[in-house]
Amino acid sequence: MSELKRTSLYESHLKAGGKIVEFAGWEMPIQYEGLVVEHEAVRNKVGLFDVSHMGEVSVKGKDAEKFVNNLVTNDVSLLNPNQIAYAMMCNENGGVVDDLLNYKYSEDHYFLVINASNVDKDFAWMQKQAAGFDVELVNLSDGMSEIAVQGPNAQALLQRLTDTNLDEIAFFYFKDGVKVCGLDTIVSRTGYTGEDGFEVYLSHEAAPVVWEALLKEGQDLGVKPAGLGCRDTLRFEAGLPLYGNEFDDNISPLEAGLGFFVKLDSPFIGSDVLVKQKAEGLARKTVGLEMVDRGVPRHGYEVAVNGEVIGHIATGYTSPTLGRTIANALIDAKYSEMGTEVDVLIRGKAAKAKVVSKRFYTKQYKK
Amino acid sequence: MNVVKGLYYSEDHEWVKVEGGKAKVGVSDHAAHQLGDIVYLELPEVGAELSAGDVFGVIESVKAASDSYSPVSGVVTAVNEELADGPEAINSDPYESWIFELELSDASELEGLMTAEAYEAFIAE
């Protein structure tokens, strides 16, 4: 096994009492004080996440927009300069290679943000798809740190460290060249928690300076460092998918319930398969489940009806915000109607659950 | 981390409280902290025969499910049903939150467990 990587904030995590685990080849903090207090800090105040493990790729050249639009499920030609679109990249079978944020500088310059676990796979995929396009792809992942500032107090906190008026950065827009603590950054109003907040891309040298300043200046705003543990519970409650859980190379965006981010009238790799899926009706659907019996439905557990396996759990938790034990599951579409009773096989035992809406938490975005 | 005197402790961070020929089993404060916010507990069944080292149940925190091991052998005589409704008591009061009680089949096994002092040293390592 290759050596684990550390972000530029590793020392800060140790100092803050972070419990370090291996994640996607990185040594990352799973929690500091505790998952639930960090989760609540993000929902009610503000939390800081080190997301420097995420990958970044720049796309430059005359065909940049054409290339990205062929690569991803959304229609990025509709974006304004400095606007961002969430999308997935599909393979030729309609499965998901990864999901990503597409930052549009201009028609000939895009900045793509991809998952840590998929950086090498994604970059190789992008390079393969670049044949015939006049573009230059650069994998910037190793040279960039990223801090997510998330929660209702995120703007108040970040505003203390910058002269740029953050009101000028609307939801899913970004600005390059923002000085934070006097240091060069890219700031976007994006996140992975269902709360208002920002993601700040910056150099490895700048990251510890900004991180420490955010912690220090945010005391009265209730700031806490937040680990990967609550990153997952927060994104799950907010209905935000995770590669490897809600979709993967063999699950399509439509099956994952993400049709909103799929623009079939703007063809992309795999779109022909998705057009067909849509026309014929989905054989599998992603539903929300709520447990009736006791037990926690975890990723990968089987879902069954009358002893016959009909699907599996994508993500499940006892929700810290809602107190309900809930899950997303990809199941045979026959059983996807609200109220349908199914069994979740928990360590071999059937525990009853019912199909519910998967809108568990209403996102508190500032639009 | 709180370690209560007069109990026996296992390397898997369970505590054993002996009362006559019976023993109550729970998890230590240290274990409760390591597990994080506990949301679910799978209890053993009354009458179940456990050998030392057997999985008696599962403790689940928000993040993960962890097998739990019986530190001693015997037949389960009672389980703490209150914990099924309020498993978070293990976090707030680990030494009052006994999980199950068993009739000890081999009291000499207790000698293989740690005293409070030894356990304190063990978790300090």
Image (cartoon, helix red, strand yellow):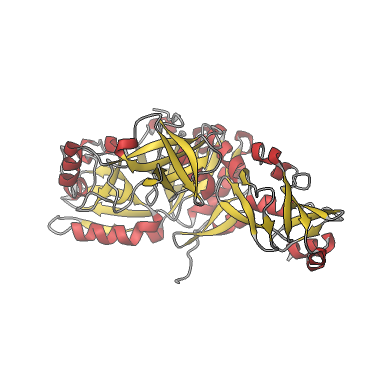
| Residue A165 visible at all | no
Lateral position of residue A285 relative to residue B24, left or right:
left
Q: Nearer the viewer, residue A274 or B41?
A: B41
Image quarter in which the C terminus of chain B is found: bottom right
Q: Nearer the viewer, residue B54 or A253?
A: B54
Give percent across and percent down for residue B110: 81, 64
Q: Nearer the viewer, residue A246 or A28?
A: A246
Give percent across and percent down for residue A156: 52, 32
Q: Nearer the viewer, residue A241 or B10?
A: B10
| Vertical position of residue B97 compared to residue A361: above or below | below
Look at 50% across and 62% down and name the residue there.
Answer: A6
Give percent across and percent down for residue B11: 71, 64
Label count reads 0
View extreme (bottom): residue: A1
| Residue A73 visible at all | yes
Which picture quadrant has residue A283? Answer: top left
Give percent across and percent down for residue B115: 83, 62
View extreme (front): residue: B47
Lateral position of residue A139 relative to residue A154, left or right:
left
Lateral position of residue A70 relative to residue A166, left or right:
left
Look at 32% across and 38% down and name the residue there.
Answer: A257
